[in-house]
Image: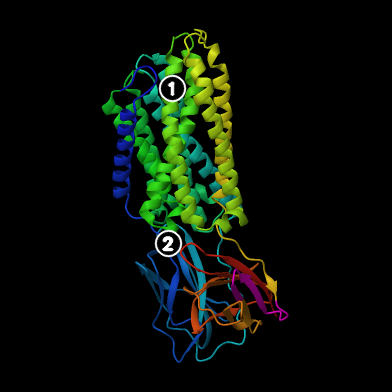
Amino acid sequence: MTSGDNGPSWQWVARLIAGVVAALASVVMFAGPASAHAALVDTSPDDGAVLAEAPDDVRLTFNGPVRLLADGIRLYDAAGEDFPVAAEGEGSEIVVETPAELGEGSFVVSWRVVSADGHPLSGSFTFSIGSRSDTVAPAPASADPSADAQRLHSVTQGGQYVALLLAAGLVVFLGLLPRSAPAAVRRRVAKVGLVMSVLASVASLLLVPLSAAIERGAGVAAIFSTTALSDPGPVAAEWLVAFLVTGGLFLAMAASRGGGGARPGRRWYGVALIGVTAALTGPALVGHTRSFGPEMLLVLTDVAHLAAGAVWLGGLVGLVIALPRLAGHGHLGAQVLSRFSTAAAASLLVLTVMGSVLSWRILASWDLLFHTSYGILLLTKIAIVVVAILVAAANRFVLLPRVQDPERRDETGAGTHPIRRAIAVEGVLLVGALLVTGFLTNQAPHPSPDLVSAPAASSHAQSIGDLRIVTTLDSGTVGPNTVRIETEDTSGAPRTLPHRPVVSLSSDSHDLGSLPITRTGPATYEASAILPSTGTWEIQVSLRLSRFENPVFTVPVTVS
């Protein structure tokens, strides 16, 4: 397994990497396909349609499978009366049976569903029977996740990542300890790894009810309800993550202990690596990176990126634990340092390559790297990691040779003090990189362009590169309205978009959600909506310019 006392041979490292890749492939294959966000693509009746008689049912069609929530479909008349409806959904279509007592006038259908990847979606559309109503009473606003629930979810997920990487990395570090290492050192490393495994498992399990609360638009108190147990469908992905993290880590810890603190054999250590791989695969199955595709490539890349970070961070913590306890044991401290140096070099290579792949697939533009909040945070993270790599290089090429030199090494371990201080600096830098990553995951990779108001109160224009977008609200009064999106190039000529825009309307007290939109001209798109109240409303427009460019901007309008 080793090549002298200077660390593991590259042949052993190659076998280790091959084992991880094989385990990763098996876990991903059996985990099932991941899904991206669904979107409403069609309704029957059409949004804004005027019908001669009441329809037998109302149908909503999405571009992917969705799941209905309790009371997810509501039907209101122009006076605000809530009609009881029966709705059922299968796959990408929801069918709503309409009551027989519907009279003439306008009706609002409000819907809230959960897409296959666990993200809540909501919206509304209108239709009329006979003729449109002159006014429409305000309908209850769609439930939105509380800020406290979202913050707690972000903090918990950050804690999950830190504990998971430490636990997984310490398992790998156990395999780097020499066979002659004292059992007390191995037990201490395993104990810290077990504590991190418990914390990662608790965080993963807590994310299940938190995700359920956010999907239902509830607050923090809702995490104490039994919804996640009684109706696990909407949070099935989170349950899978919790299972993989908890089961994988405890399998890894049990196998890596090898019984009574003794060093496990290669077969048991292989089982431990399979457990680590399963645990690291969990978070990648619910990550937003899958939305950019190709899906399988990014899932594999994400897991490899996490694994490399785990080897580095967990190894640093393992050294902090082991080096003081190896003082007085001859060359063991230098041997462990040399082995970790080899593993860290491989992990840094993987971390760099996989991180570059993820960043490019998400940003796909040098301009976005330097001119967006996401890009600036990514550059900050890269700068921190580069400094950590420089410290690691000093460890490997300056401090480690001193420790390995028999003439400069003593039995007290004092010779390792400089390298232990450098290791502490590395650890602090990596924790800083993880903190930046926490903010990074909440940033949109693509910018919201600055809004430039046109003279008309209900018409606004903005530019995105060489594309100019004019957003108009007509009539800008309570009742039926049309949102018009017109796109043109810098010369004023119409410019057709590759995909239809996604438009939503909301105010402080109402959220009409995404509006079905149709193309009415070469570069003109229109959506209909019934605005129930006066005041300031916001039109949110999302443009799918390419696979990797999806700018979103908000237009404030006044409704009288």
Residue 447 visible in image: yes
The image position of residue 242, as x and y in percent, is: 41, 43
Is 365 included in the stretch rendered in magenta?
Answer: no
> Which image quadrant: the N terminus?
top left
Q: In the rendering, which numbered label is found on residue 115?
A: 2
The residue furthest left is 267
Residue 459 sits above or below residue 323 on the image = below
Which of the 4 quarters of the picture holds residue 80?
bottom right
The image position of residue 130, as x and y in percent, is: 50, 91
Horizontal side of 93 relative to 482 (left or right) equals left
Which mark's residue is nearer the viewer, 2 or 1?
Answer: 1
The image position of residue 452, as x and y in percent, is: 69, 72
Element under disc 1: helix
Of 321 and 506, which appears nearest the observer?
Answer: 321
| Tag 2–tag 1 contact (CB < 8 Å) | no
- The residue at which mark 1 appears reads as 338
Of 457 and 350, which appears nearest the observer?
Answer: 350
> Which image quadrant: the C terminus?
bottom right
Residue 20 sits above or below residue 223 on the image = above
For the point 53% across and 42% down, the residue is 158
For the point 43% across and 78% down, the residue is 43
Of 455 and 193, which appears nearest the observer?
Answer: 455
Horizontal side of 310 relative to 526 (left or right) equals left
Is 463 included in the stretch rendered in magenta?
Answer: yes
Q: Earlier in the sequence, mark 2 or mark 1?
A: 2
For the point 60% across and 48% down, the residue is 377
Element under disc 2: strand
Give, as a single range, the part of the protein colored magenta: 454-469
Query: Which kind of residue does numbered mark 2 sit on?
Result: Ser
